[in-house]
Amino acid sequence: MLIREATLADAEGIAIVHVDCWRTTYKDIMPSDFLDKISYEKRKDIWIKNITSDENHVYVAENNEGKIVGFISGGKGKK
């Protein structure tokens, strides 16, 4: 396992993990039509903005094959 700072090339992998986690974690909790509307492409766009923002820090966890299996994002809180 490798944990490293995210690059723009990671946006798609982060989006896949993000969407898939929401769909499995919130199944039977959130309406299925809401979860079905969450798209990889829209999340990818969000993660591109997060990765390129000077206010966010995004890191990914890769397995031994180089596949993104997790991520974390944080930054300065807003008052």
Image (spheres, helix red, strand yellow):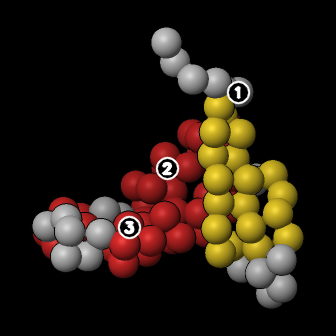
- Asked whether the residues under the numbered discs 3 and 2 touch, taking CB atoms below 8 Å apart as contact, a structural biologist would say no
| Amino acid bearing label 3 | Trp
Residue 32 appears at what percent x and percent y?
Answer: 16, 73
Q: Which residue is mark 3?
A: 22
Residue 25 appears at what percent x and percent y?
Answer: 37, 72
* CA distance for labels 2 and 1: 16 Å
| Amino acid bearing label 2 | Asp
Closest to the observer, 26 or 59: 26
Q: Is residue 54 above or below residue 13?
A: above
Residue 24 appears at what percent x and percent y?
Answer: 36, 78
What's the mark number on residue 21?
Answer: none
Q: Residue at x 59, y 63 (%)?
A: 14
* CA distance for labels 3 and 2: 17 Å
Query: Does any portion of residue 25 appear in the rendered image?
Result: yes
* CA distance for labels 1 and 3: 26 Å
State left or right for residue 72 relative to residue 45: right
Q: Which is more N-terminal, label 1 or label 2?
A: 2
Closest to the observer, 52 or 35: 35
Q: Which residue is mark 1?
A: 54
Image quarter of residue 67: bottom right
| Amino acid bearing label 1 | Asp
Label total for image: 3
Please state which of the two labelled residues, at mark 3 or mark 2, is closer to the viewer.
3
Element type at mark 3: helix
Please state which of the two labelled residues, at mark 2 or mark 1, is closer to the viewer.
1
Using a 10 Å C-alpha cutoff, classify the residue at mark 1 as few (fewer than 14 neighbours), some (14 to 19) or many (20 or more): few
What's the mark number on residue 45?
Answer: 2
Q: Is residue 30 above or below residue 59?
A: below
Residue furthest to the top? 79
